Image (spheres, rainbow, N blue to C red):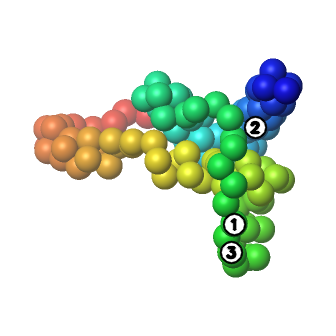
Amino acid sequence: MGAARTGRASKRRRAFTAHLPPDPIVSARLTFALQVLAQEGQLVGARTKRMSARVDPGLLKAAKSKTGLKNDSDLISAALAVIAASDDFGPWFAAQAGRLSKDFTLDF
């Protein structure tokens, strides 16, 4: 029975990552988050933790629309991954202030 469970979990993982959001920014953020969490060893592979929550239906509808995800579990997993993954862009961007000379111009 353990092998059957592992096979099902593996299929669900593949299904989740195979249906990345159509929005390229959302898709990139989710892909990045999942890669970071996997590299840090924070993903255990099987989705076995059950949770229950009450959410605003409008929020759920907007999040599903933005991500293209239809399954509530996939949507919650995606949101948690984006929150849990470290993203150093903000601090890095702030540290870049003053790096370009005042006469720097972009030519198009």
- How many angstroms separate mark 1 from mark 3 (CA)? 10 Å
- How many angstroms separate mark 2 from mark 1 (CA)? 20 Å
Viewport quadrant of the C terminus: top left
Amino acid type shown at disc 3: Val
Which residue is labeled 1 in the image?
Answer: 52
> In front here: 63 or 102?
63
User: Which residue appears at 78% of the width and 50% of the height?
Assistant: 69
Name the N-terminal-most of marks 3 and 2.
2
Name the N-terminal-most of marks 2 and 1.
2
> In front here: 96 or 8?
8
User: Which residue appears at 83% of the width and 53% of the height?
Assistant: 70
- How many angstroms separate mark 3 from mark 2 (CA)? 21 Å
Amino acid type shown at disc 2: Phe
Characterize the local packing of mark 3: few (<14), some (14-19) or many (20 or more) Cα atoms within 10 angstroms: few
Amino acid type shown at disc 1: Ser
Residues at circles 3 and 2 in contact by the CB criterion of under 8 Å: no
Indicate the position of residue 91 as horizontal and vertical percent values: 26, 47
Indicate the position of residue 39 as horizontal and vertical percent values: 46, 25
Query: From the viewer's perspective, is 97 left or right of 22?
Result: left
Which residue is labeled 2 in the image?
Answer: 16
Mark number, residue 99 = none
Q: Which tag is nearer the camera, tag 2 or tag 1?
A: 1
Characterize the local packing of mark 2: few (<14), some (14-19) or many (20 or more) Cα atoms within 10 angstroms: some
| Image: 56 above or below 99 | below
Mark number, residue 55 = 3
User: Which residue appears at 64% of the width and 31% of the height?
Assistant: 45
